[in-house]
Image (spheres, coloured by chain):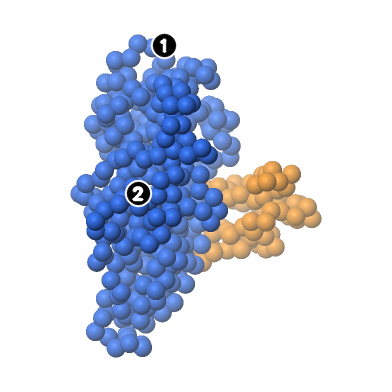
Amino acid sequence: MTHRLVVDWPRCRAHGVCAEVLPELVWLDPWGYPVIDQNGVAPELIGLARRAVSSCPELALRLVEVDGNR
Amino acid sequence: MVNGAESEPGSAKDSALLLVAPHLVLDGAESVARAIGARRIHVVVSGSRPPVEAAVTRAIAQRDTEIAWSVAATTGGFVGGHSSAVLELVAGRANRPVTRWAPAAQGSRRQRATLLSNAETFAQTAALSALGAEGYGALGTTDEPGTTLVSIGGDGIVDTSATTIVGEVPHGVSLEDVLGRRQPPVAVLVGGYHGTWVPWHAATSVLITRRPGRGGPPILGPGVLLPLAAGRCPIQVSAEVLTFLAAARIGQCGPCASGLPELAAVTTALSRAGRSRSAPLGHPPAAAAAGDAGDQVSTLASLINGRGACAHPDGAARLAYSLVAVFADEVEAHTRGRCLT
């Protein structure tokens, strides 16, 4: 089981907090919306990923568990 | 849930089925409902095709069944036909796509567990029950038995008044077999406005399949095949389609709201740059702005791809990528102020 950060796009309002909290995995596109590293969240970054999730003012970011084959 | 919303403008197969053989679709849906123990079937049709809604309502009234049927018409335009938007509509909310955290069949707090398929899939199910495995497999290939429905557009592509032909074709036949004609097109947009360009010289090797693999045949999507007539510039047509797609976005997801109009604008600028034929080769002023237009198109496509609640930006990106890949020479010529068409 690995973890991935997933954006709830209709909720995201480009506050950019996720990129501030977790610059290792989140960049911002030219319009300020997050670009998420698609390789999943490494175990040592899970704590920061959870913080990015809880820091989102729109509750638009989730940490989800995915099967190894996806 | 029977999704007959068919919001793709070039698609007419579900409308054709529901107008000509509605009971085939309803029979399929009912046998599936019985198999899974569902007691209610929702049929969703396009709000912009009233005759289809009337035909479905009439057909349901003719049926003697214990199933509770309901018919709903989309109000959400192009993206209103997306499966999550259709589920929202039937749940009594706005007909717009939402982020899906679990498969519809699994259910969630927002929605009861639902088996949702396209209208054609239910018709295929009914055909399979009626014909039996052997009869159904008489057409198609061993790996992929049976047929699929396609909508073949006129040469206009973005001309919605052009006549669309709906056909049933066996899996495994080539694009050339399906479209074979005396005046071959330059290319075919396979999959409709969210589709992939296939140059005509490849049409013999591109096979009709619902199981495209990575690097394999193009995604058939709604089964729309749009031939590009000789004399029509693929960049201009792509720009027109992307402009249509940008206008059809509902703007609830940031990357698509911002990026899709930019993608349409860059492609349109590239299209216009090719018309400055009189400019000398080298550094024509009109083409200067188009400089790295091909790269810009790819970059913008990658910035919207996969970044929305529905597949609308993904489809636009697919079209843009294939324009740059298949018509690389044309794109390059346009940046120098020339059109090869």
**Horizontal placement of A16 versus B223: left or right?**
right
Type of residue at label 1? Glu
Instruction: Give the residue displayed 44% in from the left and 44% down from the top.
Output: B172
Specify the colour of chain B.
blue
Chain for mark 1? B
Please give the label number shown on residue A20. none
Is residue B4 at all visible to an observer of this figure?
A: yes
Counting other residues with Cα less than 10 Å from the Cα at mark 2, is it few (<14), some (14-19), or many (20 or more)?
some
Type of residue at label 2? Asp
Q: Position of residue B154 (x, y in %)?
A: 24, 51
Letter of the chain shown orange in the rendering: A
Q: Which residue is mark 1?
A: B66
Q: Which residue is mark 2?
A: B177
| Residue B55 in the image: above or below residue B169 | above
Chain for mark 2? B
Q: Position of residue B4 (x, y in %)?
A: 36, 34
Q: Position of residue B211 (x, y in %)?
A: 51, 44
| Residue A4 in the image: above or below residue B93 | below
Instruction: Give the residue displayed 37% in from the left and 51% down from the top.
Output: B175
Quadrant containing the N terminus of chain B in the rendered view: top left
Q: Earlier in the sequence, mark 2 or mark 1?
A: 1
Of residues B133 and A64, the one nearer the viewer is B133
